[in-house]
Amino acid sequence: MKEEIVSFLNYLTVEKGFSGNTIEAYRNDLNQLAAFASSEANKRSVIPSWNHFRRQDMLSYLLDLKERNYAVTTVARKVAAVKSFFAFLTAEGEIKSSPMENITSPKVGKPLPDAISISQVRQLIDQPTKSSTPEAQRDRAMLELLYASGMRVSELVSLNLNDIDIKGGSVRCFGKGNKERLVPIYQQAAKAVENYIIHVRPNLVHSDIEQALFVNLRGNRLTRQGLWQILKAYAQSAGLGKQVTPHTLRHSFATHMLSGGADLRSVQELLGHANISTTQIYTHLTSEHIRRTYDKAHPRAKQAD
């Protein structure tokens, strides 16, 4: 049963271009399903195989997930992985029909992204300036670039030296499905990155062949986990606490751009969203700004009751 899972994951990697994080999540979910399927097959004294996994087994699996008290979002993710997997097996002729037929995924309410105010962003980005150490200068460049571009954390740590154009004020990044996009960055961010590249990075890298833009103190490419720890420390020193997550600056970028008058299509392209419906979630966060604009601009809104 594991062979089919490996084939499916290879398909997602090669054909669909799924990210490493998504592949690992699918691997864990499907291995959990395989263990459950093997257990059910043993109870019926049949050889464990996906051909023997029935719709009733699938319903039992969903009940098992519920009894384990998984969050609805987690169950929805697991069901999505399983549904895609069985669709793949059906298309490949490995099974005759999917045991997921007529089984719906649990509905998940889409949470609003967490954004911080412009003044809080300034507080966060200013934290590294309290120190003149090489890592503090690197951190300032990273935070400026995150907020300037709205990049995902995974996209930022994947940047190479040739992905940043200081003179042109832009950065090239690769999003989901390895889709490339060019994002403009403001001058202050470009200068912070330039200062890091010229004065800091040469003292951190230990190999001429290292192409990573942002490196750790060992001279290796900085990881997502490493950046998260850095961000968490600065958020605490800025007094922002648990509000800040690895995606906070991305969410704040989108919210502030829309509040500043940017159109939805432009923000969609900057964020690298495949569908505009994903970007539309941010419009809920700009309602207060729209209300203020309305009250200020509409001639009747200015009149007293």
Image (spheres, grey):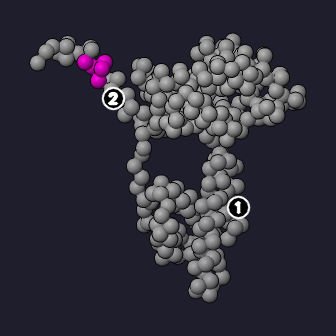
Q: Specify few, some or many for label 1: CA neighbours under 10 Å numbering under 14, 14-19, or 20 or more.
A: few
Q: Which residue is mark 1?
A: 6
Residue 295 percent coordinates (x, y): 25, 18
Residue 251 percent coordinates (x, y): 50, 32
Residue 292 is one of the magenta-drawn residues: yes
Q: Nearer the viewer, residue 104 or 160?
A: 160
Mark seen at residue 17: none
Q: Nearer the viewer, residue 158 or 182?
A: 158
Magenta residues (range): 291-295
Query: In the displayed structure, would residue 85 be above or below residue 190?
Result: below
Mostly what secondary structure, the magenta segment? Answer: helix
| Circle 1: element type | helix
Query: In the displayed structure, would residue 267 be above or below residue 15?
Result: above
Tell me which residue sits at (72%, 15%) in the image. 195
Q: Quadrant of the C terminus?
A: top left
Give the residue type that dot 1 points to.
Answer: Val
Mark seen at residue 287: 2
Q: Which residue, as the protein is rendered here, is positioned at the far left? A: 305
Quarter holding residue 134: top right
Tell me which residue sits at (82%, 26%) in the image. 204
Residue 105 percent coordinates (x, y): 44, 60
Res 100 seen here: no
Q: Is residue 299 left or right of residue 276?
A: left
Give the residue type that dot 2 points to.
Answer: Ser
Query: In the displayed structure, would residue 208 be above or below residue 281?
Result: above
Res 36 seen here: yes
Residue 229 is one of the magenta-drawn residues: no
